[in-house]
Amino acid sequence: MKYYLESMGCQMNTADSQHLASELEKLGHRATDSSHEADIMVVNTCVVRQSAEDKAFSRLGEFNVLKQEKPDRIIAVMGCLVGVQDSLRLRKRLPYVDVFMSPSDPQPMVDFLHRRMTEAEVLQLEQQERDERDALQDGEILLPAHEQNSLISAHVPIVYGCSHACSFCIIPRRRGVERSRSVGEIVAHVRSLAVQGVREITLLGQIVDRYGKDIADGPDLADLLRMVHRVTEDTGLERIRFLTSHPNWMTDKILDTVAELPHLMPVIEVPVQAGDDVVLQNMKRGYTVDQYRKLVANIRSRIPDVAIHTDIIVGFPGETDEQYQHTYDLLAELKLDKVHLARYSPRPHTLSARTMPDDVSDEEKRRRHETIDDMQAGILAEINARKLGKIVPVLVEESTKGRWRGRTPQNKLVFFEDTADWKGKIADVEITWTGPWSMQGRLLTSKSNQSDHFPVPIFANDNAQNQQIALKS
């Protein structure tokens, strides 16, 4: 059967969708990019804002129309709309949905498909699983056939859930308490992606620098980074990133590890959310503006040429013009490399929704959003202009409109032209033009000088022998 999988929202959802796709591929199903062609239709949902939740319900309604045309189609919903607890209310609202999956848990889909199999199909699957047992160990992911030796960048969760309840955040309620994956499982996951052609992985957590805090005497994030870094020694893995960090748990040990290890990229994503102490207190963030300012200085002092990314929420309940101006002024002062902007949206059952009136108008939220966005464009133009005439290593992701597209270690977008095949390789590019959102350059690297240390090719998962060779290499 063919499956169609649509993922909304954050990078964690992207990773969860990849995990589900892996399980479907192991069962012999194949991906399609058209819901109209699919026998299995899945939407992985986000509810961090009301608009995202509305979009999820709308998409499920469209799936229902397709199911009415072909009743044996399977509809499934995954992610934060389902949450960590079975919701009778949701099942009543979506009676046409066959499978409900909590975040990061594809097992209900696997069980559902098993129940629909004939006895002969079960026997065939059991034999296939025996053939592949040595190739795919716990924690390893089998990419869809069309992504093997094609997908350049992938995400690997290392911490599920969150136990630090900011007053505005629905994630702890929907994804459950914080729980770290084992080092062995994570390394196996990373290695399995690397031998299938992935050149860059991003380790994920709602608060990634709290990795291991739920395990007595367990490894911390810096320890894990060193173990994952070893995968680069005998695979084609080139770059390792991690996100999202919290200011309260960003340590010198983590920063020094990033500075020391060559395949760890110099990017730290550490949200401030607001530039006013009263607003931060109302958000229950647990730090002050001055503490954040000192953290940024410390990051820059320890990691050469680092890029720092942050998140900002404008229009939080009670945020005055003066408090908003403090946020604007902080960003103007720090000149960070990326600002993820969001307008406050009250979410059910969060502390802010229960106790604080949403008293900033939508018009004012939009004005504040646009003002910071305009300022940040100028800051990025200034930062990127420093790269003019410099040579930067670019990991090439794809070709688009006749140009190669890739990213620098600091995650800056770069375009260049060349007739050779650069996908998945690192190109040395001299920057000839810069703007706020991207840069353009001239290729310096000769393709003949590139070390094509790609892993052993992996083919469709009906070839267990090739998988075993590749995943054990």
Image (cartoon, helix red, strand yellow):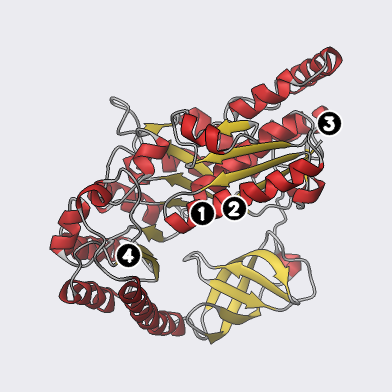
C-alpha span from label 2 to label 1: 6 Å
In front here: 73 or 176?
A: 73
| Residue 166 can be seen in this image | yes
Measured along the vertical axis of the image, is residue 341 above or below residue 96? below
Q: Is residue 255 left or right of residue 453?
A: left
Q: Dot 1 lies on which element?
A: helix
Horizontal and vertical percent for residue 162? 34, 39
Q: Mark 2 — residue?
A: 58
Quadrant housing residue 17 = top right
Q: Give the numbered dot on residue 462.
A: 3
Q: CA distance from mark 4 to mark 2?
A: 28 Å
Q: Amino acid at mark 3?
A: Asp
**Mark 4 against mark 3, which lies toward the viewer?**
4
**Badge 2 vs badge 1, beta-carbon distance below 8 Å:** yes
Residue 4, horizontal then vertical, whole percent: 72, 45
Q: Which residue is rendered at x = 45% and y = 80% of the image? A: 384
Mark 4 in CB contact with mark 3 (< 8 angstroms): no
Whether residue 472 is situated above or below residue 34 in the rendered picture: above
Earlier residue among tags 1 and 4: 1
The amino acid sitting under disc 2 is: Ser
Q: Which mark is residue 302?
A: none
Which sits earlier in the primary sequence, circle 4 or circle 3?
4
**What residue is shown with label 1?**
54
Inspect this view and state whether residue 104 appears.
no
Q: What amino acid does circle 1 point to?
A: Asp
Count the labels in the image: 4
Say which quarter of the image contains residue 438: bottom right
Name the residue that disc number 4 marks: 312
User: Is 436 left, or right, of 326 in this rendering?
Assistant: right
Q: Secondary structure at mark 3?
A: loop
Give the distance between the C-alpha atoms of the residues marked 1 and 4, in whole angstroms. 23 Å
